[in-house]
Image (cartoon, grey):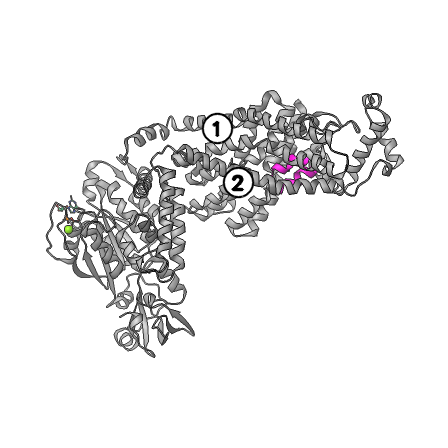
Amino acid sequence: MRLSELKPGEVGVITKILGHGAFRKRVMEMGFVRGREVTMVLNAPLQDPIKYALMDYEVSLRRAEADLIEIALLEDWNSSRPVADANTDLHDSAEEMTLRRDQIINVALIGNPNCGKTSLFNFVSGAHEHVGNYAGVTVGAKAGSLSHKGYRINIVDLPGTYSLSAYSPEELYVMRYLKEETPDVIVNVVVASNLERNLYLTTELIDMNRSMIIDLNMYDELKKSGANLDFKNLGRMLGVPVVPTIAATGFGVEQLLDTIIEVYEMRNKDTRHIHVKMNPVLESAVDILKTEFKNDHTVSHHFSPRFLAIKFLERDPEVDNMLRSNPNFPKWEQIRNDESERIRRDLQEDITSAIAAEKYGFIQGALQENMEGSTAHDEKSTRIIDAFVTNKLFGFPIFLAVMWLMFWATFQLGSYPMSWIESLVSWISGLIGNYMADGPLKDLLLDGIIGGVGGVIVFLPNILILYAFISFMEDSGYMARVAFIMDKLMHKMGLHGKSFIPLVMGFGCNVPAIMSTRIIESRSSRLITILINPFISCSARIPIYVLLVGAFFPAHGAWIFTGLYLLGIIVAVLTAKMMRKFWFKADETPFVMELPPYRVPTFKATMRNMWSKADQYLRKMGGLILVASILIWALSYFPHHDANDVPASYRAEAIAEMPASTLTSNSPETINQMIADEYQQGHSILGHIGKFVEPVVRPMEFGWKTCVSLIAGAAAKEVVVSTLGVLYVGDDDAAALSQRLQQPSKVTGVTPFTQASALAFMVFVLLYFPCIATLTAIRRETGSWYYTLFSLVYNTSLAWIFAFITFRIASLFL
Ligand code: GDP
Ligand code: MG
């Protein structure tokens, strides 16, 4: 009987929890586990919810939830059961067999037509149902039963179906059966020699999140075909145990029955809930609906929210019927219409075929990895492209060529619009310099805002181009192939092919890259991927490189860029290897790498994607970077001193150090003003901070201004450039910052950077602590301050060491 049938005051013992995995998990966490006593306390006025006493507290359950909990009345339970010690470790021992006596497992056979369900059913139950080599032989459900290792197994042979939907009578039958009968274990029978089509149904059952097993039937035909399938690994990837059988002869059936018991008792090692991942465009639609369904307790507990969301998007009539009575239904329909429209626009495909294509992509990925001699490809163009792109010989060169093209476009093509924006910025600052009256406001505008924000905004084109490439690679399906060909290489670092995607995305921005590590299912791989991500040089660091390379190595730009990116990658790889070796024990949960069909992303979708990035970048300009620039300016402006505040001794010293050329070519007033400016910066709040920290970076000959810019980079890496822009203002404001960095100070005669220190500075910027946004992402995704702090300390120490080595070596040659 069900818990909902218990009358007030009656006591029952829980025997079984039905429903999908997430539901079972939730009620078990509430304390509803097998063998526990429950007393019904009272009904709410409308008979729903119902209050129960469980252990020493009271909980209330909705009627629909209580319907999914199977119980026995206490008196029946006590009289039927032998006394056994609950703590013994049982493995088919005599005690366990006794414990299991009279326990029932309900099993449903589900699979495509003609995959051998009835043969299996006949074999295990001793029935003689009609077996035929054509579709539609099994019309209704046939039930039989058998005993195995103390359990009574009720087995139901369902009609064959290709998917779970409500379009054919067979499909509708299966769907309703799953909803109403909630079998304990689903045995998904698949034909070993035609896995691609058969696994489609499997992906839907996985969405449903029920206890299940894959019966790899007709294993004899697979063997005969000469194909080689690593079914153990396939099972581990899918999170569903796979058992090969030959139903016609009974081979493997014993193993299948054992596995049914293992899964039922929740001690199967391969069982794990995975997601059949789809394109982000689809996933976001699924997410919205999933959250809606999850938060609405009246929605059926029979199906998982994800399954419902996908089926609802597919406009499955049965799911519509289930949800229609809900007051939120019109709202959900609205969501579905909006999302369908969006998906059609972005993918140029209707939602149902897009979902199907993605599921086939998942299956293809799973088979490509586990099957030799597979004919897993569906579409011809996809097959042809994949023949090259994932080829052993061409795969890597093609990938490197794509990367090279990406960086070339970013820096070479990007340099044209960059110079236009640069001239616009200096035109504006020239205008202000000439027409505005002197005073703090002018200083703020010129040195704080234009010096800071203007110095960074010029890099907008580079960043747009880079993002255009990354989103094109993601949307077209190429990124998935990259993960695929990188898998082996990534395994050498103790990571997985999927870790490669966040690393490539890191070239754009480390924050979304760290968030995208959610696709990695193994926790330790995820942690490592998160922690090495900041070494991947993000686009915010581009301005710094462009600035310094332009100033000090104009002829060798490409080499230095490549070198820096490579250094970042090498440090990431070594860190990953070390972490795997000393810190995180390997956990080898294999998972499927989807190979979705190739799509040509629409121009509109790419533009929209690019614009949303530009929007983000501009917001960052208007927000964080503007605030940081003003703050830095203010800290360098206050406390304010003018020429009269400069002590005579300071003046004398400055003049003594001044290059002769400055003294001869300037009027005494100009010289006075120059000394006053220098005094101001050095004696401002910022000057004190910078000089306090400077000794730490002195071995690389970074001045205190450089030091301040590094600290300011915590806000966002672009701020390093804007800070340099604010601090190294010369008397010639219109001169580009890159020129100002090369010119020796007219007061002290010291050049801000030499070639060697510029190089060391770039290395330092590449490796040192991540910006605040990245640290926040690390904190959120790892859920721990410990890793966040580690990232801060480890990266900065490494940056210092590498910068120092770079400086020493460079000093020898330059
Ligand atoms: P159902 O439609 O899923 O119920 O499939 P049936 O049980 O009716 O079987 C379809 C056909 O496949 C029959 O001709 C069976 O004899 C054959 N068959 C079933 N299992 C196996 C197997 O393991 N190996 C081979 N070679 N044939 C099988
Ligand atoms: Mg049949």
Q: Which residue is mark 1?
A: 406
Q: Quadrant of the N terminus?
A: bottom left
Of 314 and 409, the residue lying toward us: 314
Q: Is mark 1 within 8 Å of ligand 1?
A: no
For label 2, the residue is: 510
Check the image and report above or below for 600 versus 120.
Answer: above
Q: Residue at x 64, y 27 (%)?
A: 809
Q: Residue at x 75, y 42 (%)?
A: 692
Mark 1 vs mark 2, CA separation in Å: 18 Å
Q: Is residue 488 left or right of residue 756?
A: left
**Any magenta on residue 40?**
no
User: Looking at the picture, how far across and down is residue 100, in whole percent?
Assistant: 27, 66
- Residue 84: x and y in percent read 32, 71
Q: In the drawing, does residue 645 fall left or right of residue 309?
A: right
Q: Quadrant of residue 694?
A: top right
Q: Specify start and end residues of the magenta stretch as a single range.
A: 707-723
Q: Which mark is residue 764?
A: none
Q: Secondary structure at mark 2?
A: helix
Residue 478 in the image, given as x and y percentages of width and height: 39, 33
Q: Is residue 686 visible?
A: no
Quadrant position of the C terminus in the picture? top right
Amino acid carrying mark 2 in the image:
Asn
714 within the magenta span: yes
- The amino acid type found where label 1 is placed reads Met
- At a point 63% along the width and 38% down the height, the residue shown is 719
**Pick the front one: 366 or 675:** 675
